[in-house]
Image: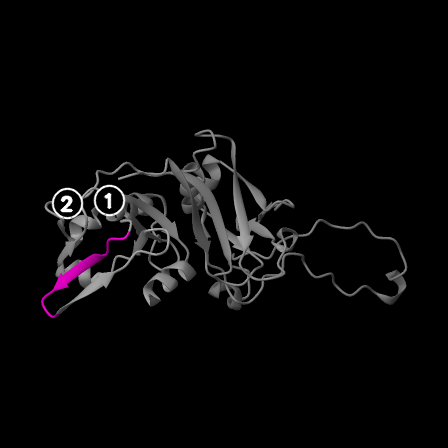
Amino acid sequence: MNQLPFFVYCCLFSLAVAPIQIGAQEKEKPESAKDQPTKKEPATPATLGKKTPLDLQNLARLPYKQLMKIAQSDMRQTKNAKSYKLKIQSSLPGVKSSDIQLFLDVPEKPVVLVVDNDGFVEVPNSVNLYNINPDLVANQPRGTLSISVEMEVPKSKPPKIVDGKVAYRELFRPLVEIETEMKKVDPTFGLTGQQQFVLEIETGKEPIKITRAFGSRTYRPNSKGKIYMIKEAYLYEENPTVQIPDGVKMNVIPASPEEIEDIRSK
């Protein structure tokens, strides 16, 4: 099985639908003071602390410890660095990097994280923050932000194909092994269906056939001679026999929800 040395892993950053107010509202000034110059105070993020209105308690959270696990899995960055750079972006059309505002919800003293024009945010690696484990909070709707890092693909032995046949679980074993490793980095990996892998199998012109007790299913290659397969829970439980050409080239690759839905529809 051919394995890519690394891939870009995207962790969905789920946030509440209601936007968070990052800047504190300015109180109404007395009539006599409205025209007087005043010293501008730095913006203070709203927090999820005890003094916060109850409606903000409904915000989805990304704990600092989980954020650090993802950041430290980035193959481009030094281990135990003082800070890590993460790529963050929105799936909503028209939302620019400059529109995304983030802060770590440290009690009484929130830590503002600035997103640059290229969509990168620098997160401090701090023992104190690790012990406090604050939430990373943003001003964007839930499910619209993703944090991406470059991760090494775990090595996995190819499935054992004998006389053109292989058990369904054995065929998907490399994919399951990689998913298991990813869950060590992100416990929510795969739970929402937003981060998944698929099998990419190069068969040329040959199809792949799954033989079941009550019928069969045939997968035919596309114009490039490739077949893409999703691990289906009911087939994994049933574990039917898969007829597949010997010596095929196979990869485990990440796929977006849209790509997975497209594969499933075919």
Which quadrant holds the N terminus? top left
In this picture, residue 104 sits left or right of residue 214: right
Task: State which quadrant residue 261 falls in.
Answer: bottom left
Picture coordinates of residue 168 (x, y %)?
A: 17, 54
| Residue 8 rendering spot, x and y as whole percentages | 44, 44
Question: Mark 1 falls on what kind of element?
Answer: loop
- 124, 92: nearer the viewer: 92
> How far, Cα to Cα, is label 2 from label 1?
10 Å
Amino acid carrying label 1: it is Val
State if disc 1 and disc 2 touch (CB < 8 Å): yes
**Residue toward you, 110 or 60:** 60
Label 2 sits on a secondary structure element that is loop
Q: How is the image coloured?
A: one colour
As drawn, 193 above or below 8: below
Nearest the viewer among 129 and 7 is 7
x and y percentages locating residue 208 in the rendered image = 21, 56
| Pointer 2 residue | 161
Q: Nearer the viewer, mark 2 or mark 1?
A: 1
Task: Tell me the quarter of the picture where residue 75 sits.
Answer: top left
Q: Is residue 109 visible?
A: no
- Residue range (magenta): 205-214
Disc on the earlier residue, 2 or 1: 2
The residue depicted at 34 percent of the width and 67 percent of the height is 265
Check disc 1 and report the residue beneath it. Answer: 248
**Residue at image coords 47%, 33%:** 76
How many dots with numbers?
Answer: 2
User: As shown in the figure, which amino acid type bears the numbered disc 2?
Assistant: Ile
Residue 213 forms part of the magenta stretch? yes
